[in-house]
Structures are given as structure tokens and as C-alpha cells.
């Protein structure tokens, strides 16, 4: 489906609640399926990715009831052999987390995914899992993954990449392994797995970038999932660049391992204020007030902050087009392994709008400030984050734009258009 975006409004104004966090939704449904007893998850995501995780847990024999965004899980704490291949759809998180669990079960299973997921690298999880004794077969480390249940043992693993999916995969395998598993990473990636497993009584400790886990029985979960900062990012950027806008985004997860976009936009000079910070189920949550800001400045973004804003880089690149001077985004080569090669696709689509942007091996360089042209078709590349970035770009283009395959937004954020309409 092509979506046409035009400047058919004056400003963005008002207050909205940002829907449920995708990362937390995956973890909540998967972990509560492993806990003996009744778990209740409030505000579960309506995105297709977390629903892939939910459906897989059902296929593994867990009793799951869904009442709008409230999910009730009744589990005996174990998975049963599935009758067919488990479909992860477009979701890397589903595939990588489930692989860690399935590797240590007493049955065989197959994880498969869509065209995009089948191109994404799985060596990063197959390697550590194999060191733990897992038996996983695949064609050149790509989906489908044929997993033979095995007896796992703990390892001490040092990862060269800061990836929460890899970390979570190894930690979850560690839950079923003999002996302790430790995991160390170069920079801290999102720590939702550690927080949630710890709340569920797992034998897990964290010390700087080192996590240690041992075989544990999980207690049921009762969680209210906060809003997704990665979804809020589109509204934060829109609020900053659409003239005279003023918006309040309610109930946003502000876990420091995720909130790099707040730090970066403030550094650029953006008017962003955090209101009513609180702790909800171990996660930092708050409301974010954003105001249109003139005179934003380009900055350099790289190093330790990258994992804390990895999914927001396409929309941060768009923001950089409205900053004076140069923005350099570096140390982000893993963007090439996302739902699309996000360095390539972000650069190619923003170029179509007249942006002065250059691809580098590990990021991009944007020269601002540029008036975006429009009167062109851009391509989401079947990547939800690119579809949403291009929509926000369309709000400030001189002429209308048409976004190809916009429906991929449903992977993480089906409520996206409705919420923008509320603010217009
Ligand atoms: C995620 C981790 C990140 C992120 C993805 C969700 C998670 O991936 O890009 O959207 O929920 O653990 P990597 O672990 O590959 O960096």
C-alpha cells in the first residue's frame, strides 16, 4: 500500500499515550510462558512482532488468553514439542530469544522467518549456543534454524557486538544449562531481560557489563508495560521539526540503555523535557514534552551511545537534516543487519528528498540544514522504522510524498497514523 503524506495541517499539538514497548512485550510473553503459574501482562503490544512471540508460545503448548491488550498466561513452566515449524515472521527478537530457550529443551524444533528475517545473521547466536553444547543446523547460519534439543552447559562468553538479542539468547540458554553462564559485552545493550528475569526470581546478577545467570525456576509475572521509546522517537522528531509544535508523550520507557535519543536531541539543542519520572516494574518511565526548536545544531554520534538509540538512527538522520552543520553517525555498522540495511536505505530514501547525506561503512554523514522537496515516491523497503521515518519527513516536505509499502508500520506500531491524526 502506498501512503501519500502532505502538509495538510498547521502544527502538531496535544497529548498522546505511546503504545506498548515491543522489546518488553516479547520478553513478558516469553518469560511468563516459562514460569509456573498465572501471569498477567497489561498493555501488551499490538505489533506483529510481539504477536509472533505470543503465537509461538501458544504453539509450544502454553495456555494464553488475550483480552485486547491484557494477556493472561497459565503455564506449567514447561514447553511441549511443537507440531510444526515455529514462525517468527519478521521478528529477529523472537528468533534469537526463542533459539536460546529451544536449544536446551528435550525436543527438537524449527524456527523459521519471512524473507527479510531469513537474510539476517544468526551466526552471532549459533556460535555461543554451540559452545554451550547446542545442536543447531542451518544453511550458512540463516533461518530456518533446525534445533535439536540438547543438554547445555554454562560458558563465559565475551561478545564483540553490543546486542541485547544475542545477550538475551545466551542468558536464556543459561537458564537451562548446567553450571553458571557469564556474558560480557563491549558496551551496555538494553537490559530488559536482566531486569525482568531478576523480578521473576531468576538467579541472575549484573555487574557493569558482566551478567551472570544460573539455572532457575521463574516466578509468574505481573507487569504493566510502558510505552515504547522507539515508537515515541517519531513524535519527538516531528515535534522538534514541525514549526510551532508542542506535544506531550505520556508513559514512555526511559531505561537509560534505551533513551539515547533524549540525550542526542538535547545535545542538538532540542527543547525536550522529562516530566513525572517514575519506576514501573523495575523500568524507568516518564512523560516527554517536546517543543518545536529553531537553530538545532549538528553533532557527532558514536561509541557507547549507539546501542541506546540503534533503532532510532533513521529518524535521527532525518532530524539531522534540520540541524545547522554536519552530523556524523558512526560505530553503527550493525544497522546493516536490521530489517533492511538501514544505512543504505536511510541514505537512499533521504537523498530522494534532496538531503545532503553520504553513506559510510559504519554510519552516515548528514549536512544540514536542508529544505526537503517532496513530489517523489520513496520506498519503505518493507522496513517499519523506515516507513515511519519517511512519514515524519513527509510532514515537512514542500510537496507531498508517496511512501511505498507503508503497511510495514504494523510490525511495531499499528496505531502510528491514528496518533499523528490526533495531534494535527
Ligand atoms: C532488540 C534489540 C536490538 C534492536 C531490536 C530489539 C531487543 O537488536 O535493534 O529492535 O528487543 O532485544 P540487536 O540486539 O540486534 O542490537
Image (cartoon, grey):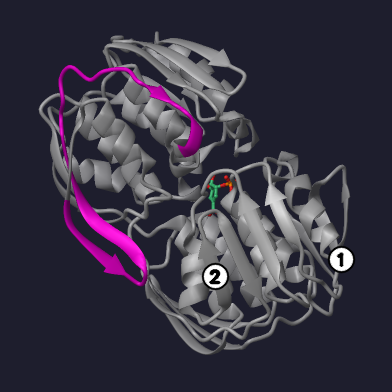
Characterize the local packing of mark 2: few (<14), some (14-19) or many (20 or more) Cα atoms within 10 angstroms.
some
**Horizontal and vertical percent for residue 342?**
56, 29
Spot occupied by residue 302 in the image (x, y as percentages of width and height)? 47, 28
Instruction: Look at the numbered disc 2 and give the secondary structure of its residue.
Output: strand
Does the image show residue 63?
A: yes
Q: Residue at x 61, y 34 (%)?
A: 334
User: How far, Cα to Cα, is label 1 from label 2?
Assistant: 23 Å
Q: Residue at x 46, y 50 (%)?
A: 412
Quickly name the residue at label 1. Answer: 133
Which residue is drawn at the image coordinates 36% and 46% (left, top)? 259
Q: Position of residue 105 (x, y in %)?
A: 79, 76
Identify the residue position indicated by label 2 in the image: 205
Q: Is residue 224 left or right of residue 268?
A: right
- 323 lies above or below 261: above
Residue extending farthest to the front is: 207
Question: Looking at the figure, which quarter contains the C terminus?
Answer: top left
Name the side, left or right, on which 87 lies relative to 339: right
Q: Is mark 1 within 8 Å of ligand 1?
A: no
Q: Quadrant of residue 423?
A: top left
Q: Tell me which label, 1 or 2, sits earlier in the chain.
A: 1
Q: Position of residue 14 (x, y in %)?
A: 12, 45
**Span colored in magenta:** 275-304
In the displayed structure, would residue 150 be above or below residue 79? above
Badge number at residue 318:
none
Amino acid at each position: 500500500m502506498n501512503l501519500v503524506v502532505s502538509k495538510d495541517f498547521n502544527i502538531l499539538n496535544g497529548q498522546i499515550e505511546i503504545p506498548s514497548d515491543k522489546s518488553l512485550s516479547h520478553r513478558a510473553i516469553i518469560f511468563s510462558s516459562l514460569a509456573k503459574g498465572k501471569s498477567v501482562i497489561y498493555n501488551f503490544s499490538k505489533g506483529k512482532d510481539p504477536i509472533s512471540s505470543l503465537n509461538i508460545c501458544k504453539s509450544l503448548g502454553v495456555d494464553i488468553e488475550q483480552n485486547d491488550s491484557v494477556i493472561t498466561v497459565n503455564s506449567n513452566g514447561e514447553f511441549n514439542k511443537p507440531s510444526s515449524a515455529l514462525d517468527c515472521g519478521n521478528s529477529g527478537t523472537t528468533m534469537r530469544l526463542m533459539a536460546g530457550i529451544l536449544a536446551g529443551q528435550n525436543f527438537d524444533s524449527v524456527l523459521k522467518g519471512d524473507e527479510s528475517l531469513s537474510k539476517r545473521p544468526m551466526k552471532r547466536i549459533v556460535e555461543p549456543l554451540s559452545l554451550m553444547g547446542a545442536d543447531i543446523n542451518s544453511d550458512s547460519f540463516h533461518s530456518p534454524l533446525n534445533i535439536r534439543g540438547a543438554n547445555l552447559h554454562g560458558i563465559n562468553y565475551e561478545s564483540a557486538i553490543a546486542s541485547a538479542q544475542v545477550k538475551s539468547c545466551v542468558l536464556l540458554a543459561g537458564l537451562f544449562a548446567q553450571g553458571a553462564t557469564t556474558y560480557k559485552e563491549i558496551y551496555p545493550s538494553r537490559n530488559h531481560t536482566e531486569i525482568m528475569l531478576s523480578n521473576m526470581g531468576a538467579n541472575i546478577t549484573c555487574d557493569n557489563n558482566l551478567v551472570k545467570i544460573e539455572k532457575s525456576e521463574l516466578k509468574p509475572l505481573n507487569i504493566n508495560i510502558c510505552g515504547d521509546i522507539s515508537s515515541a522517537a517519531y513524535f519527538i522528531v516531528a515535534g522538534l521539526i514541525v514549526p510551532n509544535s508542542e506535544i506531550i508523550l505520556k508513559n514512555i520507557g526511559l531505561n537509560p540503555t534505551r533513551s539515547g535519543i533524549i540525550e542526542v536531541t538535547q545535545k542538538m539543542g532540542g527543547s525536550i523535557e522529562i516530566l513525572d519520572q517514575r519506576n514501573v516494574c523495575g523500568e524507568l518511565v516518564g512523560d516527554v514534552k517536546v517543543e518545536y526548536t529553531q537553530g538545532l545544531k549538528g553533532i557527532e554520534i558514536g561509541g557507547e551511545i549507539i546501542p541506546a538509540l540503534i533503532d532510532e538512527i533513521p529518524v535521527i538522520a532525518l532530524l539531522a537534516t534540520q540541524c545547522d552543520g554536519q552530523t556524523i553517525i558512526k560505530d553503527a555498522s550493525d544497522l546493516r543487519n536490521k530489517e533492511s540495511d538501514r544505512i543504505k536505505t536511510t541514505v537512499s530514501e533521504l537523498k530522494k528528498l534532496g538531503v545532503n547525506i553520504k553513506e559510510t561503512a559504519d554510519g552516515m554523514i548528514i549536512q544540514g540544514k536542508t529544505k526537503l522537496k517532496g513530489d517523489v515516491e520513496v520506498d519503505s523497503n518493507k522496513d517499519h522504522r523506515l516507513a515511519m521515518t519517511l512519514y515524519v519527513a513527509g510532514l515537512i516536505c514542500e510537496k507531498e510524498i508517496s511512501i511505498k509499502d507503508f503497511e510495514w508500520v504494523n510490525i511495531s506500531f499499528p496505531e502510528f497514523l491514528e496518533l499523528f491524526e490526533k495531534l494535527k
